[in-house]
Amino acid sequence: MKESIMSFYNAPITNQVPNGVVSIDQLYTYVSANEWLRDRTERTRAALDDEKRFRQLKQSLLPYVTPAGVFSYRKEDRLLFPSGELVIDIDHLASPEEACTWRDTLFADERLRPDLAFISPSNTGVKLFVPYRLSVTATIEWAFDEARRSAWEYLEWRYGLKADTSNADLSRACFLCHDSSAKLRNRGN
């Protein structure tokens, strides 16, 4: 695994200027072990029975990253450095247990080989940070779009899963939440 870096943003979602840069390794530690994030995640998930309130809390309490790279401002034309990562978001699974099963299954997939996998804020979804090859002969946007399209098609063909297609742009936010069982691909694996 290469050392991918991306922009990190403090909540709320209206904050469009990054607060720093984070690596996949740092992100894993933050998602799996940070007590402050655990508290924010629990507060957000406490509203799961009220969709509007849950969305409001997610957007106001949870920090986020732009997995596609480092940005000066969260807008596609403000990309400073691509990470070579894209996020695949699988939503609306039947239960938290099913989400855990899919997190582990998809993390182990030899074709996708995600660098990071964790349960989404809803507790019934999975977020996968999947590496892709940057090209010296194609634009970043083209390489990103091709990798995203290929990954989505593979998920549907292999597992019958549909990825959230709103993650189609480079500057898309990915909310972070606590998952003590998050998965990190070790270097050399």
Image (tube, rainbow, N blue to C red):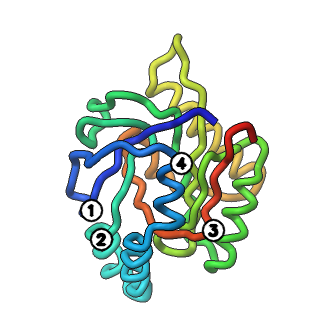
Of labels 2 and 4, the one closer to you: 4
Label 2 amino acid? Leu
- Sequence-earlier tag: 4 or 3: 4
Residue 46 image point, x, y percent: 41, 87
On the picture, is 83 further left or further right than 97? left
Q: Is mark 3 on a helix, strand or loop?
A: loop
Which corner quadrant of the image does residue 71 belong to?
top left
Q: Name the residue under label 1.
A: 11
**Dot 2 and dot 4 residues touching (CB under 8 Å):** no
Of labels 3 and 1, the one closer to you: 3
Measured Cα–Cα span from mark 1 to mark 2 = 6 Å
Q: Dot 2: few (<14), some (14–19), or many (≥20) neighbours within 10 Å?
A: many
Q: Dot 3: few (<14), some (14–19), or many (≥20) neighbours within 10 Å?
A: some
Measured Cα–Cα span from mark 2 to mark 3 = 21 Å
Q: What element carries label 2?
A: helix
Q: Mark 2 points at which residue?
A: 61
Q: Name the residue under label 4.
A: 25
Relative height, residue 39 to residue 59 (above, below): below
Q: Which numbered dot is residue 181?
A: 3
**Dot 1 and dot 2 residues touching (CB under 8 Å):** yes
Measured Cα–Cα span from mark 3 to mark 1 = 23 Å
